[in-house]
Image (cartoon, helix red, strand yellow):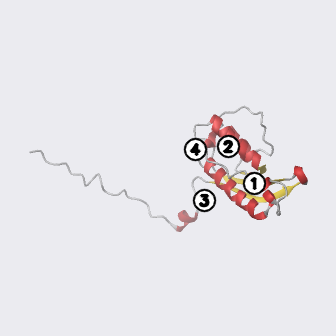
Amino acid sequence: MAAEPDLSADTRRLNTKKQTLDDAYAAPANFLEIDVCNPETHGFGKKRYSDYEVRMRTNLPVFKLKESSVRRRYSDFEWLRTELERDSKIVVPPLPGKAWKRQLPFRGDDGIFEEDFIEERRQGLEAFVNRVAGHPLAQNERCLHMFLQEPVIDKNYVPGKVRNT
């Protein structure tokens, strides 16, 4: 009868270094923070629209800028979603709804320009962009970099991957 091998050596815990307070409160090894904030409404009548500030901070080497701040409209988020669906291999999460009923004329309120609606949409857009940007494959897409870091989106850009240089 063969002797059973001793597995206790395989199941021992690794010797790990105790975490110090400096380690616990130091900057994380890799981080990507994106905030959608400061909504503003511009224009009058049919030319009225809202946009949002999109602030990014990161230490990921794939991003050329470590901090950026751009203003984006809902339609810019739609553009990003469409580009990612077309060119990347990831499942792109949905955007918050278009709110068609809020755009009907003769409403007793401001429709899509109501503060509560703008705040709800802002939260949805922030959740969307953080889910997308947190995906490792999406982080290499040129459209995401343009969306987060370029003041103006060049909709005639050549889709592709960002190369680390």
Residue 148: give x, y in percent of width and height. 72, 47
At a point 58% along the width and 52% down the height, the residue shown is: 30
Residue at the bottom extreme, as displayed? 21
Instruction: Please report whichever mark, 3 or 1, sits nearer to the chain's N-terminal start.
Output: 3
On screen, residue 97 above or below 22: above
Residue 93: give x, y in percent of width and height. 61, 47
Label 2 – label 3 distance at C-alpha = 30 Å
Instruction: Please report whichever mark, 2 or 3, sits nearer to the chain's N-terminal start.
Output: 3
Left or right: where does residue 144 sit relative to residue 152?
A: left
Q: Amino acid at mark 3?
A: Ala
User: What residue is pinned by disc 2?
Assistant: 81
At a point 65% along the width and 51% down the height, the residue shown is: 128
Residue 59: give x, y in percent of width and height. 64, 51
**Numbered badge on residue 101:** 1
Label 2 – label 1 distance at C-alpha = 22 Å
Camera-side mark, 2 or 1: 1
Q: Amino acid at mark 2?
A: Arg
Camera-side mark, 2 or 3: 2
